[in-house]
Image (tube, helix red, strand yellow):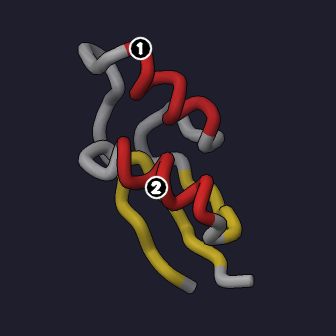
Amino acid sequence: MKKIKLTQTKSAIGKTARQKATIKALGLGKINKTVEHNATPQILGMVKKVSHLIKIEEN
């Protein structure tokens, strides 16, 4: 399965509770933290909702 690398680039302070929960569910929470996930439809939907806070790289 295809992998994607996510890096948080902006703070979640001042964002909605739903966006904060999505960032946490993706395993992020601090600026410049990087995680890898499989590119499943569920993960891609979460990424789309917080795309303004993260940087996405495809492997």
Residue occupying the far front of the picture: 41
Locate the C terminus by quadrant: bottom right
Residue at (41%, 39%) from the top-left corner? 31
Q: Is residue 2 above or below residue 34?
A: below
Location of residue 20 by image quarter: top left
Residue type at tag 2: Thr
Which residue is labeled 1 in the image? 17
Residue at (50%, 81%) from the top-left corner? 58
- Other residues around mark 2 within 10 Å, as few (<14) / some (14–19) / many (≥20): some
Residue type at tag 1: Ala
User: Who comes first in sequence, dot 1 or dot 2?
Assistant: 2
Helix or strand or loop: what does disc 1 sit on? helix
Helix or strand or loop: what does disc 2 sit on? strand
Location of residue 36 by image quarter: bottom right
Residue at (36%, 43%) from the top-left corner? 50
Q: Which residue is more in the foreground, 3 or 31?
A: 3
The answer to whether residue 46 is left or right of residue 12 is: right
Q: Is residue 9 above or below residue 20?
A: below
Give the label on residue 7, or none: 2
- Other residues around mark 1 within 10 Å, as few (<14) / some (14–19) / many (≥20): few
Q: Position of residue 8 (x, y in %)?
A: 42, 47
Q: Are marks 1 and 2 in contact (CB under 8 Å)?
A: no
Residue occupying the far right of the picture: 1
The image shows a total of numbered marks equal to 2
Q: Position of residue 40 (x, y in %)?
A: 65, 66
Q: Nearer the viewer, mark 1 or mark 2?
A: 1
Q: Which residue is more in the foreground, 10 or 4?
A: 4
The answer to whether residue 13 is left or right of residue 1 is: left
Q: Position of residue 12 (x, y in %)?
A: 35, 26
Q: Position of residue 45 (x, y in %)?
A: 48, 53
